[in-house]
């Protein structure tokens, strides 16, 4: 039986919360992205990744794997011939935008590789099949890719070979390989706030908290959820772990755990008997978790606090259509003038529909209680610092003056010369100065194209103004008595 979460999950006095009246709304049809053939792969990832510039969607592709990258403003019907990112030889299973560069995206595929791409400033003009770097190290398909939150060019991937690899994208090397920790398929991996730890959910029903640089498990919970269906685990900003899974009776559950004592959950709630995996999206600034079930037609949201029952049901946003996947916009991409606190990009079979969550307020002033300083795009650490053991908290920015994006640095990859170790040490030191061969031509062409289009536009304007002038002169001539 489908029980309403508000009735059963949290029988208690209505509590005060500024998020109790969060109002969800799907945008009008002309602001959706239409005619997109969303991937049909049976894999429980979100299939969609968004940032303040682009929305990326994994799509059906014949003979390989592809995803589409659309500038946010490019809504409406998408042409069938619209260019894609199509370098993988097998279906793409997961994509993730780099938090420190809005033009860099990583993809994991059934072809066992991870690829990192640099998208031109204004989006794709032609299809892209040349990644900046190919990361090879998995022996089975790669179902999870996730960037380090605070160290530049550090990327984690997890495959169906039950292995987690952490890469230095700048050198294209696998720096850390966690091989013997997971005896079965890894369902999810999540970094903590400063990227010093990861937590994983595995098919063996265990949730593990791992220190990847020491390569040791520092906490684990067996049978966090007893059901056999996939689990998810994410870190909250205070270091606790939030999980979604299934009970032995196949009811969907939420769990909250303290890594210092994983034996007993801080709290566990039964939700309903649907069978879609619950994908959690977390806002560390407001401590709100949004749950989107694959195949559900609703988004449920909860506030997590220090008072019992710790996970407080807020509300449910429901639409008619079930969701195939979901993208979640980072805070710095939201419209603060409209009191927007979250934006989702819901995938249907043939379209992507933005859903906007707002907190209705009467005042036009900046609402600083809704927008505490949030993680900005600047990376506090370089990859080398993190691999040496340093940690850095996210560099926060204020959204008060409606965040304006800065200039992105190009991603640079230093190819190691195995024949000459000295040489490789020198190239490492000059890493920032070395431009990648593959990323520059597309950027040069991009600039050239801009230039040509500008010149054509100004010539057209010139011609049309001259035509008007000629017409005027002819008119004057006809009036003259010659």
Image: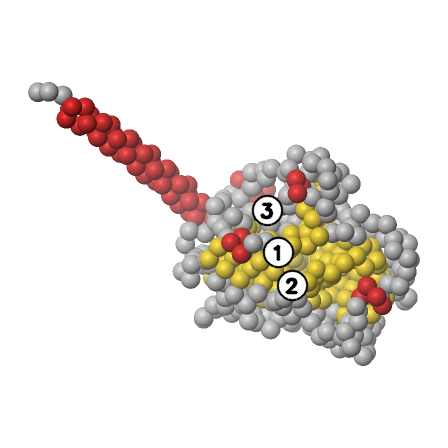
Query: Where's residue 458, x and y in %?
Result: 33, 34
Q: Is residue 409 left or right of residue 368?
A: left
Residue at horizontal 28 percent and vertical 34 percent from the top = 464
Residue at horizontal 56 percent and vertical 41 percent from the top = 408
Residue to which mark 2 is pinned: 319
Q: How is the image coloured?
A: secondary structure
The disc, 3 or 1, on the residue closer to the chain's N-terminal end is: 1
Q: CA distance from mark 1 to mark 2?
A: 8 Å
Pointer 2 local density, CA inside 10 Å: few below 14, some 14–19, many at least 20: some
Pick whichever, 57 or 90, lies toward us.
57
Residue to which mark 1 is pinned: 26
Pick whichever, 202 or 362, lies toward us.
362
Pointer 1 local density, CA inside 10 Å: few below 14, some 14–19, many at least 20: some
Q: Are marks 1 and 2 in contact (CB under 8 Å)?
A: yes
Quadrant of the frame with the C terminus: top left
Q: CA distance from mark 3 to mark 2?
A: 25 Å
Residue to which mark 3 is pinned: 52
Q: Are marks 3 and 1 in contact (CB under 8 Å)?
A: no
């Amino acid at each position: 039986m489908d029980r309403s979460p508000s009735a059963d999950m949290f029988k208690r006095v209505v509590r005060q919360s500024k998020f109790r009246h969060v109002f969800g709304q799907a945008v009008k049809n002309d602001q959706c992205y239409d005619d997109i053939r969303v991937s049909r792969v049976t894999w429980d990832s979100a299939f969609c990744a968004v940032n303040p510039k682009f929305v990326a969607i994994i799509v059906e592709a014949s003979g390989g794997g592809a995803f589409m990258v659309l500038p946010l403003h490019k809504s409406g019907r998408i042409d069938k011939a619209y260019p894609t990112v199509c370098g993988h030889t097998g279906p793409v299973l997961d994509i993730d935008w780099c938090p420190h560069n809005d033009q860099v995206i990583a993809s994991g595929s059934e072809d066992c590789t991870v690829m990192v791409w640099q998208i031109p400033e204004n989006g794709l003009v032609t299809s892209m099949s040349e990644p900046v770097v190919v990361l090879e190290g998995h022996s089975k398909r790669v179902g999870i890719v996730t960037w380090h939150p605070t160290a530049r060019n550090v990327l984690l991937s997890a495959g169906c070979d039950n292995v987690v690899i952490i890469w230095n994208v700048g050198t294209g090397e696998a720096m850390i390989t966690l091989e013997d920790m997971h005896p079965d398929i890894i369902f999810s991996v999540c970094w903590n706030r400063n990227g010093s730890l990861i937590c994983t959910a595995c098919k063996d029903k265990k949730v593990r908290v791992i220190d990847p640089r020491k390569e040791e498990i520092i906490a684990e919970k067996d049978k966090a959820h007893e059901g056999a269906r996939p689990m998810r685990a994410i870190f909250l900003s205070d270091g606790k772990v939030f999980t979604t899974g299934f009970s032995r009776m196949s009811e969907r559950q939420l769990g909250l755990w303290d890594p210092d004592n994983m034996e007993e959950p801080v709290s566990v709630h039964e939700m309903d008997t649907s069978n879609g995996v619950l994908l959690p999206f977390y806002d560390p600034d407001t401590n709100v978790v949004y749950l989107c079930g694959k195949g559900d037609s609703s988004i449920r949201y909860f506030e997590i606090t220090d008072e019992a029952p710790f996970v407080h049901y807020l509300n449910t946003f429901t639409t008619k259509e079930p969701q195939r996947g979901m993208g979640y916009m980072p805070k710095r991409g939201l419209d603060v003038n409209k009191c927007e606190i979250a934006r989702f990009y819901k995938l249907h079979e043939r379209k992507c529909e933005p859903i906007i969550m707002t907190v209705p307020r009467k005042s036009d002033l900046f609402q600083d209680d809704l927008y505490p300083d949030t993680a900005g795009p600047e990376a506090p650490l370089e990859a080398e610092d993190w691999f040496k053991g340093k940690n850095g908290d996210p560099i926060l920015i204020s959204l008060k003056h409606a965040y304006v994006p800065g200039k992105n640095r190009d991603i640079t990859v230093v190819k190691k010369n195995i024949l000459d170790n000295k040489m490789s040490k020198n190239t490492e030191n000059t890493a920032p100065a070395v431009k990648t061969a593959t990323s520059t031509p597309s950027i040069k062409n991009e600039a050239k194209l801009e230039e040509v289009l500008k010149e054509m536009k100004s010539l057209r304007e010139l011609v049309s103004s001259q035509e008007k002038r000629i017409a005027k002169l002819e008119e004057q001539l006809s009036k003259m008595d010659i």
